[in-house]
Structure formats: structure tokens, C-alpha cells
Image: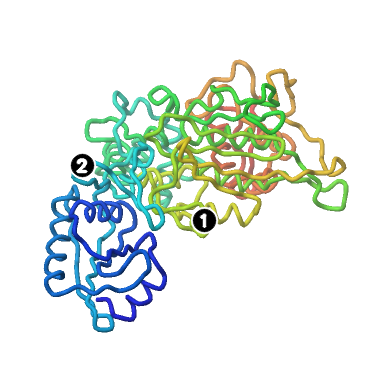
Amino acid sequence: MFTAEQIKQLILQGETTTVQFKIRSEDAYKMGVEMVAFSNTQGGILVVGVDDKIGVISGLSFEEIQQTNALLVNAASENVKPTIIIATETVNVDGQNIIVATIPKGKDKPYKDNKGIIWVKNGSDKRKVFSNAELRVMMPSCGSISADCDSVENTAYKDISEPTLKNFLYERYAEECKKAGITNDTVLDQDMDEIVQAIDKNFTVEKLLQNLQLMDASGQLTLSGLLLLGKSIQRYRPVFTIKCVSFVGNTEASTQFRDKMRDRDAEGNLLTQYNAAISFVTRNLKTVQVEKEFNTQGQLEIPLEVFVELLTNAFVHRDYYINSPIRLFIFDNRIEIHSPGILPDGVTEESIKHGISVPRNKLLFENAKDILPYTGIGSGIMRAMQSYDKISFKNDFVREEFITTLKRDEIPEELIIDTANFGVSEDTPKNDTVNFGVSEDTPKNDTVNFGVNETQKQILKFISENSQITAGEMAYKMKQTKRNIEYNIKVLKSRGIIERFGSDKTGGYRIKQ
């Protein structure tokens, strides 16, 4: 119930996205249009009996109150599709009666007027919606559709990378696995049925995946299942990948680039793509001296944890109804991450800085935290900004994408450290030190295609120098998450490139000759 004092305050503040004034209500269609705009946005109140031009109360007679109530109810049922339920009340303000109609935020968007037109609020005004991008954003925000839950036609269990699935199940059901004697170090050597039985003796692997909604009842993978566990997303969804280019200069129109990631390097599931993107970043950013001592270890010009957060955010929250890749562009003065799709309804460039998160892909969001290095609580943007404050965001409605921009500072030459720059171009000479145990004959593996990635090369280098180095120590030196290092150690072990020796406390890894 509104009080007279509350109405006075609303009038003083003027019309907004959620408040609209009308001196009289005589056209059911126009009232319906206002209600459609409110329902498709944040909801709001329609105040009848206040001049919207000068903010002066012009009270309604008893007859006008009766007619206005009938007209508003008729507009909500006949001029809004689907029909909405509104609440009306009469408020006496200094002896003059006005009507306040409350229109809730819609749960069945998009709403249309009886001519089939979609309206949304635009500040205190309203506008028509013609863009498919906006419609896609509006509908998932109400839970009516979600791309990550869709089944991917013709997929099956055969399309799953078993090493990735084993790691995923161990992370998700670590307690059950440990009780069965399955450890982080041995999970890849276990039979899949043994892992499933450790989780639930009544389950098959297919039943377990169906319960997690990563597989449908007919045995097809959902999009989330393919993205997280698939051997190759691109076989079924060719554009669901990431493109990485390091340009010479500061424009996409440049015909020169310092580095360009090959498409095959990102061939695989989201973890493969994430690892490829992180490797691309680390080899294309400058390493700078941060301590006074000349021999101290340098660090990347932009902390690596910033890219961990921003890239996982792009993979998990992008719009999978838009058929285009994520794009990572490195320019001389900035870095841009282009994620397909604008922000979900109700989320703005400003609100995400304060931890406001509305997961577009709820199924993917829930399951990706057991594969990708993120917490799953929606605070990634905040953590990235705490580590690096030169980040800006843009909701680009024209290009249908969300753009994150990181400004690069100019760094004096004397502070730049010359370090090995793995894989900068096709002509980069091979380095025997970082390729121990890897040859042209090394068998390919579903999890990592086309040899070892840059993270694994560095792991091999560390192991060759100190066989008892821990995953935590490597993570610190490489400025990566411990989970990511442990995952890549497992991959190297499963491929027979390294082997474990000794006890859990005093042992280590060595490169197999």
C-alpha cells in the first residue's frame, strides 16, 4: 500500500524506468503498451491522476476511478500478450484521489502488445525491440530457454574424453573416491566403472551423466556435456572455440600480427581451449622486473590470475545461441576479450563490477567449476579488478557481444626481461630442454592434441631440473592455479611422458626416457 507521503516523493523524483505518470487513462492500447514495457524490463508503477509534464496532481472523480480501474484491468488482459495480473489501489493525496497500478516484472518474457510489438523501458521512456540479440537475452533471464541444456544431435558417449570425465568425476565426488581408495594421482589409471561404482553402486556412467544433465535420456550429450567433456566440440559446433591474435599496432584492420593461434591448438573441450588461451597470453605479454635485485624472478605485465578469471567468465557466460567464437586480441596498447552475447537482462557494465551475477548458462555454470579454475560463486570480475584496475567493459548491442578491455601500460625497456617465448611463430626454433620425452612419435591423447601445450612444456622443464618439485611450487613459479598444474601433470602421466616414483611425501616425477 502506498501512502500519500510516498506518492509526493515519487512525484518530486519524476518519471524513471519504474515510475510512469498519466493525467488520465482513456486508451486501453496505450496503457497496454506501458504495461508491456514494464513487464519486459524491471516492472514498475503507473500513477494515474498526475500530470506527467509538470508533476501536478489532478485528482480523479468517483466515476473516473471506476472507469480507470476497468480500463487498466482490460488493458492487462486484452492488450498484453501473454496476459499479466496487475494490482490497483486508490490513494488520497491532500484531498485528491489518484490510482496507482503495480505491474510486476514478467516471468514469461517477451511480452507483446495486441499488435505483436515488443516494448521495453528506455530510461523514463520506452522503445520497440527488433534485435534478436535482445530477445535471446530477455528469454533466458526468465528461465524459458537455455542453450546449455539443449541436446546436441548425433552425439553419444563415444564423443566424451574419458580422461577429462575421470578428472571431472574425481573433483565432483572426491570424498566418495577417496573412500574407495581412488586418489588424485591414480584416478586416470582407474577403470571408468570402478569410479562410477565408488560414487554410487546403483549407477552406470550413462545414468550418472543423465542425473547431472550432461546427457539426455536418449544418450545424446547436452551442450554442457559436449563443452565440458567432449573430445572435440568443433565436430558438432565448429564456431564454439576461441580465436587468439596478437596484432602489430592498435587496430583489428592491421595486416601484421606478431602471433596467431592455430585453430587446431584450440581443438577440444573448454579446458583445452582455456589452456591454449592461457599459453597464448603468457607468450605474448611482456615479463617485467618488479624487484630491485637484478636476478629476481620477473612477472607478467598483467597478472595471469586476471586472465584466469576473465577467460573462464567468457567460456561459462557467453551466449551459446550466437554462432561465433570468443576472440582474444592483443594490441600494443590494450588487450580485448570479445564474448558473444550482451549481458543478461538486468545486469549492467557497472553492476558486474560489484559482484552482480546472473548466470546465462546455469547448467554449465554449475558443472564447469569442477573442470575450469573458477569458484562458481560469480565473483570472478571482482577478483580480476582487484588484481588489475585498468579494466573496462562494454555491452555492444550492434555487434551482439560483451567486450572486456585491459589497458597496457608503457614499460621502460630496462624493466623488460628477455625470457623464452615459446611458440611465438611457426618458425620458432625447437628447444630440447623443454621438450624432454616428447617426439614426433608421441601418441596423441583425447585430452591434449598435437603434442604438449605450453603449460606442459614448462612442467617438463621444472621436472628435468628438480624431480621432487611439487605442483604447488610449479603453480607459484608459473603464476597458474594449482588445479591446472595438477591436471596437466595427470595428462603427461597418462600419455607415458612422465612417471611417478617414491612415496606420496618424499617421491616425485621423472621424465621417461
Where's the N terminus, which quadrant? bottom left
Residue 124 image position (x, y, % from top left): 39, 58
Measured Cα–Cα span from mark 1 to mark 2 = 35 Å
Q: Is residue 422 left or right of residue 471?
A: right
Q: Nearer the viewer, residue 455 or 445?
A: 455
Q: Is residue 500 left or right of residue 347?
A: right
Q: Quadrant of residue 429?
A: top right
Q: Is residue 96 above or below residue 406?
A: below
Residue 122 image position (x, y, % from top left): 39, 52
Q: Return the residue at label 1.
A: 350
What secondary structure is marked by label 1? loop
Q: How many marks?
A: 2
Labels 1 & 2 near each other (Cβ < 8 A)? no
What secondary structure is marked by label 2? loop
Residue 359 image position (x, y, % from top left): 40, 49
Q: Mark 2: which amino acid?
A: Lys
Q: Quadrant of residue 334?
A: top right
Name the image colouring: rainbow
Residue in view at x 49 percent, y 58 percent: 355
Dot 2 alpha-carbon crowd within 10 angstroms: few under 14, some 14 to 19, many 20 or more: few
Q: Is residue 391 above or below residue 52?
A: above
- Which label number is shown at residue 157? none
Q: Return the residue at label 2.
A: 115
